[in-house]
Image (cartoon, coloured by chain):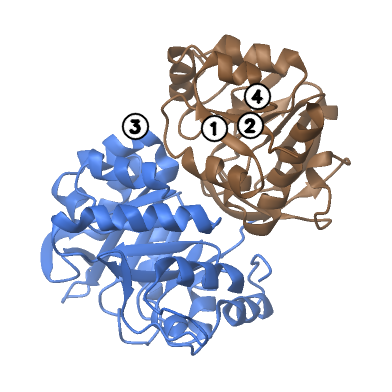
Amino acid sequence: MNVARVIPCLDVTDGRVVKGINFVGLRDAGDPVELAARYDTEGADELVFLDITASSDNRRTTIDMVERVAAEVFIPFTVGGGIRTLEDARSMLRAGADKVSVNTSAVQRPELVSEIAAEFGVQCCVCAVDAKLRVNGSGWEVFLNGGRTPTGIDALEWVAEAVTRGAGEILLTSMDRDGTREGFDIDLTRAVCDAVNVPVIASGGVGSLGHLVEGVTLGGASGVLAASIFHFGEHTVAQAKAAMSAAGVRVRPA
Amino acid sequence: MTAPLVAVLDYGIGNLSSAHKALVRMGADARLTRDAGLVADADGVVLPGVGAFGACMDALRGAALESVVHDAVASGRPFLGICVGMQMLFDASDEDPMHRGLGVLRGRVEAIPDTVRKPQMQWNELHVHATDSLFIGLPATPWVYFVHSFAARPTDPRVVVATCDYGADLTAVVRHENVVATQFHPEKSAADGLSMLGNFVQSCGGAR
């Protein structure tokens, strides 16, 4: 049976969590270990750390962070952002990440997906895809660099290729919905879920607990990822799971 | 009481540090090692594994650990296989049919049905069919984290002590004498998983 995952996403730079973390009772709102432990306690099924460090000089601090999280928090976590080479993936996995997520560099050089899957297995190779509805409405286009750079590549074709190459999971973000709080792009989520037979995590646009439910019931996603609704203390992961459970979505009890 | 020495077999694949760290957290003097002498001295042995069956078997043999595994199993000391480390204990896997498994347990590793998304990459509840020291102090239906596309089908169904439901009843925990193995990742399964590792560490303490 499918058991939907609830996945808080944390942006990190220089080994610190940034952007609007607003938990009550934290000693240090930027400490990734403390935040990860908090989400673990609330019942988060996994965590995603998105490294937005601009300079590759500071990768060492990200690796240190991954090591500290892995030593303290015993739920799965993914590290994405700035994974450009097999060696980048290796260093994150060695440090204790369970999965690495590749995005821009995989579109630029799809062999990276094959290499990571061949070396470490499909289970740790997540392909993150940022997609946007074409202006004429004829499907979705892959965007790079956080939604700034169009590629002309069809999103459904790209996810199919990524899975063929060994991606074990798709982390799908709608650039039309990201930051809008209007809910997931359900059509996009459903189309991607129909295009591949690996788990799909829906992302982008969550503004309410009902949106999380829809990602699974309407979109067909295996998991739902959200940032702001958890970070700002609007909702806890436990509340998200209660809402999903009440709507008939099977989840691990918080 | 000194902490039990638990050898975590290190044959150069993926993320082994999580299992090591979780065992340390649960009171073991855990060592990542491929040193046959250290493994022989250990109170318990853990065989982790991630990735493909064939690649793991090649790496295990490349690290000269195949006979070390057989010796550890034969010694009667507690032995824990995790994920592909569980699958390798069987005779063979449909994932890489040309590779021979360790043959510690009889049976094959087979693909999860195509009716569900693969890998099973999610938490799932265990259906526990037999009492086992691994489950001491745990809830009746523990929740644990799975990541796999293949699952073992033991020849002797009596070794199956727990299953999970994902497209079919999949083998989740097997036990044969001193050998116990989990398809899921206890080191990534929060409190329930840590409790199981704690129970394993406890059993290693009693073995000395």
Q: Earlier in the sequence, mark 1 or mark 4?
A: 1
Q: Chain of mark 3?
A: A
Q: Are the numbered discs 3 and 4 placed on the same chain, yes or no?
A: no
Alpha carbon separation for disc pair 3 and 1: 27 Å
Kindly identify the amino acid type of the residue bearing the numbered disc 4.
Answer: Ala
Question: In this structure image, what is the colour of chain A?
Answer: blue
Rendered image quadrant of residue A161: top left
Give the labeled residue for mark 2.
Answer: B6
Q: Earlier in the sequence, mark 1 or mark 2?
A: 2
- Disc 3 to disc 4, how far (Cα)? 32 Å
Alpha carbon separation for disc pair 1 and 4: 9 Å
- Amino acid type for the residue under numbered disc 3: Ala
Of pointers 2 and 4, the one earlier in the residue sequence: 2
Residue A226 drawn at (x, y percent): 42, 75
Extreme residue toward the bottom, this view: A234
Say which mark, if any, is on residue B42. 4
Q: Are marks 2 and 4 in contact (CB under 8 Å)?
A: yes
Q: Please give the residue where the numbered disc 3 appears in the rendered image.
A: A118
- In the rendered structure, the answer to whether residue B199 lies left or right of residue A115 reads right
The quarter of the rendered structure image containing the C terminus of chain A is: bottom right
Q: Quadrant of residue A130?
A: bottom left
Disc 1 residue type (three-letter): Arg
Please name which of the two marks, 2 or 3, marks the residue nearer to the observer: 2
Separation of residues labelled 2 and 3 (CA atoms) = 30 Å
Q: Residue B189: image x %, image y %?
A: 62, 53
Which residue corresponds to the image point at 74% horizontal and 13% vertical from the top-left? B74
